[in-house]
Image (cartoon, rainbow, N blue to C red):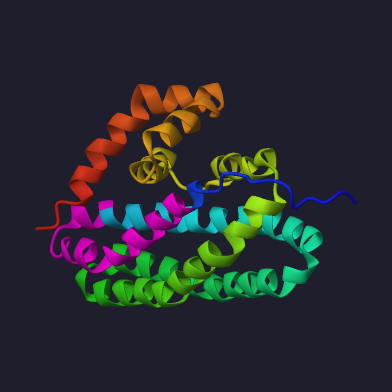
């Protein structure tokens, strides 16, 4: 086959996505704690983390469907690194399930379950953050070399199409916060027209309103 290590695909958007995971996990104690005794706020924060978890799941699925198989095929000498990243995904699955259960318990029972939710999110972070570090150091540079821009560009569409949460505009907004203006413009330019219309007509406004409320933790 042809040498597929000739690309220099721009994979810098992955760092922005990873920052969403890092910041949301780091904020868990403050966000959850701020809802003590406040049923409406608890529902809002629970929904935030439900959407967060669903985004993490579809993000990992995209890597497993689009990135890892191509790297394994085209960079066989690096297969051990790819397999290690895949193994870390498997470790995360059980921790994600624990977070989902903890969110449900917190929604149902309130303050007594808050500590369990924070603990489950922190346990997820203890595994996920080192995984993100390794991806940025090893997997993302490989993807830049071995995946074409068109192949790398399949990831956002996969995430958008497979996302199971009720606030895709929340995820879009969280990512865009970490983008450069050029990346924001490119993101909109490559969106399907209905998705772009959604963001421009109500998504951006809804994100700004919600995230301001979520971050009022004092």
At 49% from the left and 46% from the top, the residue drawn is 13
Asked whether the viewer can see residue 186, the reply is yes
Q: How many marks?
A: 0
Q: Position of residue 201 (x, y in %)?
A: 36, 22
Would you say residue 98 is visible in this rendering? no
As drawn, is 33 to the left or to the right of 88? left
Question: Measured along the vertical axis of the image, is residue 38 above or below residue 183?
Answer: below
Taking the magenta stretch, the answer to whether it contains residue 24 is yes
Left or right: 51 with respect to 28?
right
Residue stretch rendered in magenta on the structure: 15-44
Which residue appears farthest toward the left when viewing the image?
A: 218
Q: Is residue 135 magenta?
A: no
Q: Which of 162/46 is in front?
A: 162
| Quadrant hosting residue 38 | bottom left
- Residue found at the very far right of the displayed protein: 1
Task: Residue at 22% x, 75% y: name it.
Answer: 112
x, y percent for residue 65: 70, 54
* Residue under the point 49% across and 30% down: 186
Q: Residue placed at 23% from the left, 67% from the top?
A: 110
Please name the predominant secondary structure of the magenta segment in the image. helix
**Could you tell me residue 49's position as x and y percent?**
36, 58
Q: In the displayed structure, would residue 141 be above or below residue 197?
A: below
Residue 20 location, quadrant: bottom left
**Residue 190: x %, y % from top left:** 55, 29
Q: Which quadrant would residue 107 be assigned to in this image?
A: bottom left
- In which quadrant of the rendered image does the C terminus lie? bottom left
């Amino acid at each position: 086959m042809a040498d597929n290590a000739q690309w220099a695909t721009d994979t810098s958007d992955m760092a922005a996505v990873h920052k969403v995971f890092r910041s949301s996990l780091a904020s868990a104690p403050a966000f959850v704690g701020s809802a003590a005794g406040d049923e409406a706020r608890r529902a809002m924060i629970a929904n935030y983390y439900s959407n967060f978890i669903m985004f993490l799941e579809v993000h990992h699925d995209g890597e497993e469907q689009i990135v890892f198989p191509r790297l394994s095929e085209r960079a066989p000498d690096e297969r051990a690194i790819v397999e290690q990243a895949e193994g870390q995904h498997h470790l995360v699955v059980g921790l994600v399930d624990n977070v989902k259960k903890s969110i449900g318990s917190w929604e149902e029972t309130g303050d007594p379950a808050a500590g369990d939710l924070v603990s489950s999110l922190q346990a997820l972070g203890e595994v996920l953050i080192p995984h993100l570090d390794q991806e940025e150091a090893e997997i993302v540079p490989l993807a830049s070399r071995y995946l074409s821009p068109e192949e790398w560009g399949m990831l956002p569409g996969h995430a958008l199409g497979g996302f199971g949460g009720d606030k895709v505009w929340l995820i879009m907004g969280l990512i865009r916060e970490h983008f450069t203006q050029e990346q924001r413009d490119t993101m909109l330019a490559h969106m399907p027209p209905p998705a772009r219309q959604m963001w421009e007509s109500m998504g951006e406004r809804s994100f700004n309103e919600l995230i301001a409320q979520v971050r009022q933790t004092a």
